[in-house]
Amino acid sequence: MVTIRVLVADDQEAAREALRLILDGEPDIDVIATAADGAEAVRQALWRRPDVVVMDLRMPGMDGIAAIDRLAAADSAPRVLALTTFDLDEYLFGALRAGVAGFLLKDSDPDVLVTAVRELHQGRGLIDPQVTSRLISRFAALAPRPATPELDLLTPREHHVLRLLARGLSNGEIAAACTIEEGTVKTHVNRILTKLGLRTRVHAAIYAHEHGLVARDAP
Amino acid sequence: MVTIRVLVADDQEAAREALRLILDGEPDIDVIATAADGAEAVRQALWRRPDVVVMDLRMPGMDGIAAIDRLAAADSAPRVLALTTFDLDEYLFGALRAGVAGFLLKDSDPDVLVTAVRELHQGRGLIDPQVTSRLISRFAALAPRPATPELDLLTPREHHVLRLLARGLSNGEIAAACTIEEGTVKTHVNRILTKLGLRTRVHAAIYAHEHGLVARDAP
DNA sequence: GTGAGGATCTATCGAAAGGTGGACGACCGG
DNA sequence: CCGGTCGTCCACCTTTCGATAGATCCTCAC
């Protein structure tokens, strides 16, 4: 059996000890260190190399989300389980964006916490059921629209032009990229607008982004 | 104790019966109907009004995702738990976009399934830990960037103009909306571009969208 | 008070973007 | 073979955009 090396970060001593007790009570989990703020958590994590970091999001000084950002930047970053008392969108989405692997509210059962640590160690993730619905609806609002019938009307050339346009290239730059004349690009753009029922290139750019035609840069 | 009324939709009879056995074995769960394809699932759901629909995503005819779309459009829509054998992004993200409340792979433990049904009935959600990591990283790529320092440089007027611009309005339309002259709008746009370090209004529109300044239409 | 700085507004001019018409070759069914 | 359709290309002309200079008003420190 492999022991899971865990770092616990929480600014309240009582919470820290409670977490340590719960986790150390498991035969396969070993709390190797604790931290009382974000900066210390980052230092400890980089030095002790835990498998999993259990991190309170609300801490003085560097808060949990900033700490997670730092950890994610490191190579061989540990998997982070975010813990919070307060069920705020800001915490949830901030933590997810920063790259946590799990998110639990502090009113969870101790055995849920233990399960979460094991799941994270296995490379899986866990989101508190209480916040999952909100995550899903936010995700649904953000996710690219499925391919629409209109998109199939575009010829390959027009598709290509649309992708370049959506990255902010001018007609001249698109022309250079395709080694054609600018006048030709204008025709393509015009046909794109007509086929998609749009009015300006700005609409086309937004359309392309909302349909996932343009890969977003890494955060 | 309230009994949870469940509809099971799966094209394979064996799977249907297995699910029924598992769920009906619970005292608080009552499988009130089954369906063998998406269309039937929608009919049954609209007629029998289950609390929870357990739906296989891969079915002949109308598939699960299309069925979920239909169900979500209905009022007092049931909570849908998506089930799938195949762990494909297409299924996962498609189902989430369509509005499921839970997503499980079919190799899950029966008691996980039962727990999921109960969670959904309580208004919560459940995502299979095996796919949670992928959901999080996709979400992180999609989520708006946090407010950057540059955004604070914009005056209220410029903010307003930026939001209108990002919705595809021309300078003239923005001018009309603000009851100012078009020439003025051009100045605002210019200062926006300068402050944000962008070159054209297309860049500004993309920037605004990526930073969540523009609310997206409902899917 | 007064002058500095910022926010808002306006006007002008060269540079892009957008609308239109048409040329050329590829492909397909008669 | 040939007329039709489609994709790609180019040039002309009008509208819109983007950069720049300057005007007005407000606030706040001195």
Image (cartoon, coloured by chain):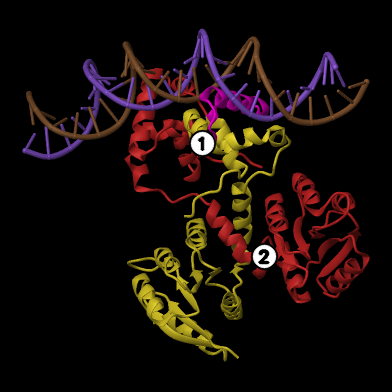
Chain colours: A yellow, B red, C brown, D purple
Taking the spot 71% from the left edge, 33% from the top edge, the residue there is A150
The chain identifier of the residue carrying mark 2 reads: B
Same chain under badges 1 and 2? The reply is no
- Residue type at mark 2 is Ile
Q: Give percent across and percent down for residue B155.
A: 34, 35
Q: Nearer the viewer, mark 1 or mark 2?
A: 1
The structure residue drawn at horizontal position 42% and vertical position 64%, both measured from the top left corner, is A69
**B188 to D1, vertically: above or below:** below
Please tell me which residue lies in front, B26 or A206.
A206
Q: Between residues D10 and B136, which one lies in front from this camera angle?
A: D10
Q: Which residues are magenta?
A: A178-201
Provide the major secondary structure of the magenta segment.
Answer: helix
On the image, the x and y values in percent for residue D20 come to 27, 23
SS label for mark 1: helix
What residue appears at the point 39 percent right and 76 percent down from the top-left corner? A46
Residue D1 lies in what quarter of the image? top right
Residue A43: quadrant of the picture: bottom left
List x then y, in percent, for residue A100.
51, 66
Q: Is residue B75 left or right of residue A80?
A: right
Label ID, residue A9: none
- Badge 2 element: strand
Q: Which residue matches tag 1?
A: A177
* Residue at mark 1 to residue at mark 2: CA–CA distance: 43 Å
Is residue A190 located in the magenta-colored stretch of the structure?
Answer: yes
Q: Is residue C4 above or below residue B185?
A: below
Task: Name the foreground residue: C29 vs B106.
Answer: C29
Comparing B7 with D12, the one in front is: D12
Q: Quadrant of the C terminus of chain B?
A: top right
The residue wearing badge 2 is B127
Residue A13 x %, y %: 39, 80
Q: Residues within 10 Å of mark 2 (few under 14, many from 20)?
A: many
